[in-house]
Image (cartoon, rainbow, N blue to C red):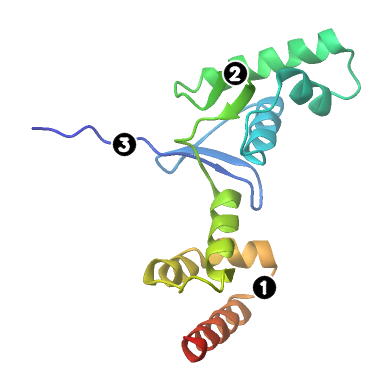
Amino acid sequence: MLVPQRTEIRVSLSGAFELSRNGESIDLATPAQRVLAFLALHEQPVRRNHVAGVLWLDSNEDRAAGSLRSALWRIRQCGESIVESTHRGLRLSPAVCVDVRELISWARRVGDASHAIDDDDVRQAFNGGELLRAQLGLEPSALMQGLVNALDIAVTAG
């Protein structure tokens, strides 16, 4: 029996914006990128009029709403369920991976003194080192030294 391959949709906000499907970059117009970036920074649904008002400040309410509809249409043309519209507002589909959310989640896990740092956290620190380096603005050697120091502290504290 064939198992259907899972499609990974990813929004990357570190460095330049990128939307990708299974590692392949998807071209998207700037207004649609702005909508995805805005929603990626909000875990909960955001009201449509708020999204439109924030992203199109210089437009009246009707024009901002039209610009948002156009951007959402362009996003839907990607062929995937990337943005969901609920009764509470717009949000990224829970299936969409967001690099910044992953980084925040990792930082909360390893910074929580009540939980031990597990093997996956260490592996993610080393495998995701490029994201961490970009976010922290560190050279690879400085990042590696910081990770070694963090692991040393974790070992001696545990």
> Local crowd at mark 1 within 10 Å, few (<14), some, or many (≥20)?
some
Quarter where residue 88 is shown = top right
> Local crowd at mark 2 within 10 Å, few (<14), some, or many (≥20)?
some
Quarter where residue 112 is shown = bottom right
Q: Amino acid at mark 1?
A: Leu
Residue underneath mark 2: 74
Disc marking residue 40? none
Residue underneath mark 3: 6
**Disc 2 element:** helix
Compared with 128, 122 (above or below) is below
**Disc 1 element:** loop
Total number of numbered labels?
3
Residue plotted at (71% across, 32% down): 34
CA separation in Å, label 1 and label 2? 36 Å
Q: Position of residue 1 (x, y in %)?
A: 8, 32
Which residue is most to the bottom?
A: 156
